[in-house]
Image: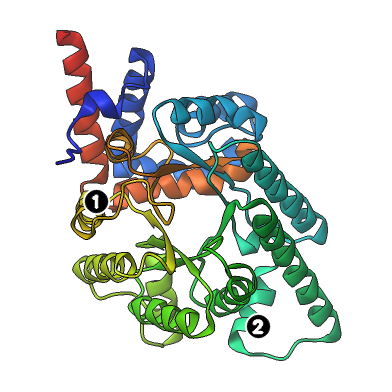
């Protein structure tokens, strides 16, 4: 029986100094007031060297692999030593120019090249708003007509997606599309489903992200499976609870439409776990990357594999957590032979800042998340002092 309480396994890769640093960082994050006060000033503060240095040596170094792919090599190798793979994530967002979009495309293709070199990087990932204007995606998702210039712009977006998915097919390295806000999700779904039909003919290589804090996504997942079975292709599913809940509810209220968000956390948990059961029952047709920091869902998936007689390292099943979070889940699962991969974000400090802010806010908003992290760090510090 796997245990997520084994801190010796969870933090074996951390030196005493790194362990103390993590304890200090989560102590800061637990103070919701401090996080709320500091985050509005962070984009301005990062322009100045002393503050930028502080951010780089604290939040950035804990939650990110570095500023470039080569910077991530150390993290990749350390994770691999303990049986954990890496998902390289170029976490730059909010760009608007064609030049920036092409740069992002080239960078993601470099992550694919890095993954091709060895088996330490089993997945790559991209965010469509890193390669397309948000306003264009919103217009397409609304079904609005495009100007001639916008049509040409969207063709370039499709070509970028095609390049990434074609390379995934050529190299055999899985690639995942991150989910985004519901009002641009329809065009994301449309594009990635087309790529699955084209390139997932032999196994799941192209993955879409399903956010289960949205009440409609479980039904969409089931529809996609039926479509894949009927047409003879595979689907790849990154299953998460989601990251835009407060923004989604606020927009729905302001614009006067029904909220797409589940009524409560219990409903999100129910759909997430039901999705796990649905996928495991059909694991030969679906590739799963279970992105979760939830211990119950992680335990459920491990138990389902045991009950169904599915081997721990089945190529269609991965557990995944973010770098710097839930090491007690990641490393204990890896120790028992399950496929595990950490999301390792990277990019220039100033460009990755929105990601870092979300991580700090996420840890304060998820009930018990930071307290659990702190309790485990305290437990391991005490254990080391006794030994």
26 sits to left or right of 181: left
Q: Nearer the viewer, residue 305 or 249?
A: 305
**Mark 2: secondary structure:** helix
- In the rendered image of this protein, does residue 255 appear above or below residue 171? below
Tell me the element at label 1: helix
Asked which quadrant contains residue 240, the reply is bottom left
Counting residues from the N terminus, which is met first, the one under dot 2 or under dot 1? Answer: 2
* Residue 128 shown left or right of residue 328 in the figure: right
Instruction: Say the numbered circle drawn on residue 140.
Output: 2
Q: Position of residue 70 (x, y in %)?
A: 66, 30
Q: How many marks?
A: 2
The correct choice, above or below, for 229 with respect to 206 in the image is below
Percent position (x, y) of residue 209?
47, 65
Residue 59 rendering spot, x and y as whole percentages: 46, 33
Q: Specify the quadrant that holds the N terminus.
A: top left
Q: Residue 302 got which mark?
A: 1
Q: Position of residue 303 (x, y in %)?
A: 19, 53
Could you tell me if the residues under marks 2 and 1 are in contact, i.e. CB atoms within 8 Å? no
Q: How has the structure been colored for display?
A: rainbow
Relative depth, front residue between 29 and 13: 13
Q: Is residue 228 left or right of residue 103?
A: left
| Occupied quadrant, residue 266 | bottom left
Badge 1 crowding class, 10 Å Cα cut-off, few under 14, some 14 to 19, many 20 or more, is: some
Identified at 56% across, 60% down, the residue is 205
Measured Cα–Cα span from mark 2 to mark 1: 39 Å
**The C terminus - image quarter:** top left
Q: Residue at x 81, y 86 (%)?
A: 147
For label 2, the crowd category at 10 Å Cα-Cα, with few meaning under 14, some 14 to 19 and many 20 or more, is many
């Amino acid at each position: 029986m796997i245990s997520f309480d084994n801190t010796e396994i969870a933090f074996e890769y951390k030196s005493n100094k790194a362990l103390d640093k993590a304890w200090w960082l989560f102590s800061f994050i637990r103070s919701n007031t401090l996080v709320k006060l500091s985050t509005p000033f962070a984009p301005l503060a990062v322009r100045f060297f002393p503050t930028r240095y502080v951010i780089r040596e604290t939040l950035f170094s804990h939650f990110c692999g570095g500023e470039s792919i080569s910077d991530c090599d150390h993290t990749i190798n350390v994770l691999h030593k303990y049986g954990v793979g890496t998902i390289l994530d170029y976490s730059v967002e909010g760009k608007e120019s064609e030049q920036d979009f092409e740069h992002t495309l080239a960078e993601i293709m470099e992550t694919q090249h890095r993954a091709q070199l060895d088996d330490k990087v089993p997945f790559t990932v991209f965010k469509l708003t890193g390669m397309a204007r948000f306003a264009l995606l919103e217009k397409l998702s609304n079904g609005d007509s495009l100007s001639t210039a916008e049509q040409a712009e969207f063709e370039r977006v499709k070509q970028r997606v095609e390049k990434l998915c074609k390379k995934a097919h050529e190299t055999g390295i899985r690639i995942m599309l991150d989910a985004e806000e519901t009002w641009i999700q329809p065009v994301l779904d449309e594009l990635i489903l087309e790529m699955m039909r084209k390139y997932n003919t032999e196994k799941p290589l192209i993955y879409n992200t399903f956010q289960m804090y949205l009440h409609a996504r479980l039904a969409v997942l089931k529809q996609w499976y039926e479509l894949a079975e009927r047409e003879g292709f595979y689907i790849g599913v990154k299953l998460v609870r989601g990251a835009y809940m407060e923004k989604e509810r606020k927009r729905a209220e302001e614009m006067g439409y029904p909220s797409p968000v589940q009524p409560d956390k219990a409903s999100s948990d129910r759909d997430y776990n039901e999705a796990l059961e649905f996928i495991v029952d059909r694991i030969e047709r679906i590739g799963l990357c279970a992105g979760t920091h939830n211990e119950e869902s992680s335990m459920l998936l491990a138990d389902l594999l045991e009950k169904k007689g599915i081997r721990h390292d089945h190529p269609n099943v991965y557990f995944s957590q973010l770098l710097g979070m839930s090491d007690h889940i990641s490393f204990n699962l890896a120790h028992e032979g399950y496929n595990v991969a950490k999301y390792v974000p990277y990019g220039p400090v100033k460009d990755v800042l929105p990601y870092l802010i979300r991580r700090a806010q996420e840890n304060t908003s998820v009930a018990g998340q930071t307290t659990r992290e702190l309790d485990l760090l305290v437990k391991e510090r005490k254990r080391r002092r006794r030994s």
